[in-house]
Amino acid sequence: MLILSFGFQEGWTMIEKVPARKVTGKVSRVLKAEGKDFASAPTDQLELTYEGVPGDFHSGLTRLSGGREPWYTRGTEMRNERQISILSEEELAEIAPAMGIDVLEPGWIGANLVLESIPNMSYLPPRTLLFFEGGVTLRIDGYNAPCRLAGSRVAEATGAEPGPDGDYTRSDMALAFKDAAKMKRGLVAWVEREGTIRPGEGVTARIWEQWIYA
């Protein structure tokens, strides 16, 4: 990997600059959340429009702000950059034993896509483009940090003990998920080019030139 250092503004600051590159992988599974919450279920194919997956819990050109956006009053309408949730087969296989369970089903934590063969997928940087063989293009917004709400669904699905007052978000399993899934929870993305994604098709991640502004 080529890393360049150069001067920046006043004085000299060592800035790491990494050239652009491409990484290839494959679509393992596709899922859709058609209920009243983010839990998703396997489907044969995933139809995508500029609003995301029609009928999916996270579809829409806009969404309402929440705890991730403290700079807005909660409930403020904003651009929906979280249309698609993407997980990695390899990372799921690492999270499960760290939580003491045999398997972590992607639908429990709301996945739309599960990819394979992309090393350290959760580390793909913002603006990375995912080009799918069928013609769809997704643009990565960023990392999807693990939360206790997703962990609570794992707790319920695996029959774990709830927390105080029957609250699964305060269960040991929910807390274990936050730790075990750190930097393995996957990514969120939005639709740059519409189309259909099917299991088995190839995907190419185009990673832009990167540098750290510090």
Image (spheres, rainbow, N blue to C red):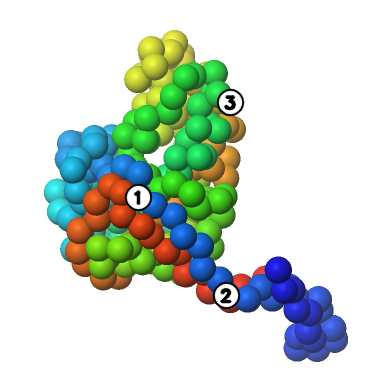
Any mark on residue 27, and which? 1
Residue 211 visible, this orientation: no
Residue marked by disc 3: 98
Residue 198 drawn at (x, y percent): 24, 51
Name the secondary structure under disc 3.
helix
Residue marked by disc 2: 20
| Image quarter of residue 176 | top right
Any mark on residue 115, and which? none
Height in image: 19 above or below 97?
A: below
What's the distance in space between the residues labelled 1 and 3, CA to CA?
24 Å
Q: Nearer the viewer, mark 1 or mark 3?
A: 1
- The quarter in which the N terminus is drawn is bottom right
What's the distance in space between the residues labelled 2 and 1, CA to CA?
23 Å
What's the distance in space between the residues labelled 3 and 2, CA to CA?
33 Å
The kind of residue tagged 1 is Val
Residue 7 visible, this orientation: yes
Mark 1 or 3, nearer chain start? 1
Mark 2 or 1, nearer chain start? 2
Height in image: 120 above or below 60?
A: above
The kind of residue tagged 3 is Ala
Height in image: 153 above or below 2?
A: above
Q: Nearer the viewer, mark 3 or mark 2?
A: 2
- Estimate how packed mark 2 is, as few (under 14), some (14 to 19) or many (20 or more) residues with alpha carbons within 10 Å: few
- The quarter in which the C terminus is drawn is bottom right
Q: Residue at x 25, y 63 (%)?
A: 134
